[in-house]
Image (cartoon, helix red, strand yellow):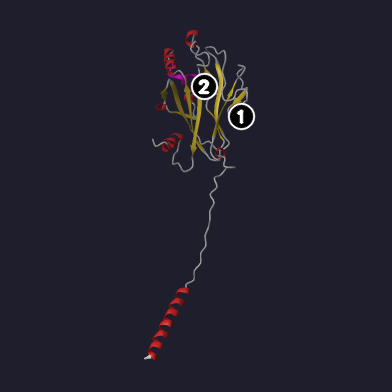
Amino acid sequence: MNKKKLLSLALVVIMIATLSFSTLAWFSDSDSVTNNFDIAGGENNNPDEIFSIDVMEAVDTDGDGDHDITIGYDQDPEYKDNYTYENILPGDMLLKRPQTKNTGSYDQWVRMSITFDNATYWVALMAKYGYTDMLDMLYMRDGVTPLKNDTNWTYAPAETAIDNDQITYVFYYNKILEPGKTAVFFGNVLIPYQFDQYDMAPFTNGDFRMVVTGEAIQVKNIEADTAMEAFAIVEGR
């Protein structure tokens, strides 16, 4: 009897040992790979080095038709971020050359807009002399080609907006703006020769104001063939 117990016990011990050995016999190992994702172009956590645009403009300060200073990106400190044209007369062709520069590290789709104050008065004044809208005053650098006819930009009349007596016109750049490149929007503002002193009287003390705004979105990973399509996708339109 005791021999049987001892034998059974020995068998149990052997089985346990065998099971334990089998568990320990599996080969195992582990390893890992770590990937760091660094955004191209950024240094010192500066988002403007990653993706940004700067809007600047060349202006003529002495009325001789030549570019004297640039305000905005590499602005003259005397003028900060705006410039006032003084002593303007009907028929004047004012050099105003807004442009946008890709100062980031990625290709961009670009949209530009022009906002005029005193929209109610402007609309009525332009219609009085047979103009379609305020865009009829804006010309390219040659002083002959209207902005609306320039092949580098697509005008989006459906996006014209009036709010708080401001009217805004929207244009899309027809090319991809690469890092470091600049796109000139338009070149000159023509004050209609038909305006008389009564027409221009409300535009004193800085009441004739035009603001140009630039916007950009990335090209990569947006399935679009044009800037207009890309902005519509991003904005869910």
Residue range of the region highlighted in magenta in the rendering: 131-138
The residue at the far front in this view is: 2
Amino acid at circle 1: Asp
Q: Residues within 10 Å of mark 2 (few under 14, many from 20)?
A: many
Amino acid at circle 2: Tyr
- Which residue does the image show at 41% across and 88% down from the upper left? 6
- Pick whichever, 229 or 149, lies toward us: 229
Vertical arrangement, residue 134 with respect to residue 73, above or below:
above
Residue 72 in view of the camera: yes
Give the CA distance from mark 1 to mark 2: 24 Å
Quarter of the figure with the N terminus: bottom left
**Residue 167 in the image, given as x and y percentages of width and height:** 44, 22
First in residue order: circle 1 vs circle 2: 1
**Residue 86 in the image, given as x and y percentages of width and height:** 57, 15
Figure quadrant of residue 126: top left
Mark 1 or 2: the one toward you = 1
Vertical arrangement, residue 220 with respect to residue 192, above or below:
below
**Residue 128 in the image, given as x and y percentages of width and height:** 42, 12
- Pick whichever, 79 or 184, lies toward us: 79
Q: As drawn, is 234 to the left or to the right of 78? A: left
Quarter of the figure with the C terminus: top left
Vertical arrangement, residue 122 with respect to residue 50, above or below:
above
Q: Which mark is residue 92?
A: none
Reading the image, the residue beneath label 1 is 74
Element under label 1? Answer: loop
- Which residue does the image show at 51% across and 67% down from the upper left? 29
Residue 194 in view of the camera: no
- Pick whichever, 201 or 134, lies toward us: 201
Residue 44 part of the magenta-drawn span: no
Vertical arrangement, residue 220 with respect to residue 21, above or below:
above
Reading the image, the residue beneath label 2 is 139
